[in-house]
Image (cartoon, rainbow, N blue to C red):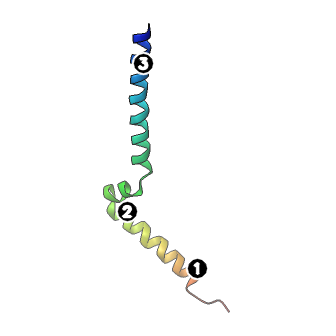
Amino acid sequence: MALEIRGRRARLGRHIAELEHKLHETADWRNYVRREPLAMLAATFGIGLRLALLFGKSRS
């Protein structure tokens, strides 16, 4: 019985470590840039253009 519990704890620990790794990988913005560099470049350009239009002109 105790051996079975230890085995389950070890498997659970591995599953938790795997989930933490996947979460970190998903949340890391650098992975998106590596996978889709042109999309990220276009998004960055679009955001920059929008900010320039919003804040670049002085309003009278």
Say above or below: 43 vs 60: above
Which residue appears at 38% of the width and 35% of the height? 18
What kind of residue is marked 3? Arg
Q: Earlier in the sequence, mark 1 or mark 2?
A: 2
Gap in Å between the C-alphas at discs 1 and 3?
56 Å
Give the image location of residue 36, x and y in percent.
34, 58
Task: Specify the farthest residue to the top.
Answer: 1
Which residue appears at 43% of the width and 69% of the height? 44
What kind of residue is marked 2? Ala
Q: Earlier in the sequence, mark 3 or mark 2?
A: 3
Quadrant for the C terminus in the image: bottom right
Q: Nearer the viewer, residue 53 or 21?
A: 21
The residue that disc 3 covers is 8
Task: Specify the farthest residue to the right.
Answer: 60
The residue that disc 2 covers is 39
Mark sitting on residue 54: 1
Label 2 residue SS: helix
Q: CB atoms at circles 1 and 3 under 8 Å apart?
A: no
Q: Nearer the viewer, mark 3 or mark 2?
A: 3
Q: Quadrant of residue 17?
A: top left
Give the image location of residue 33, x and y in percent.
35, 60
Quadrant for the N terminus in the image: top left
Which residue appears at 53% of the width and 76% of the height? 51
Say above or below: 29 vs 21: below
Q: Please indicate whether residue 34 sits to the left or right of residue 47 in the image.
A: left
Say above or below: 22 vs 28: above
Label 3 residue SS: helix
Gap in Å between the C-alphas at discs 1 and 2?
22 Å
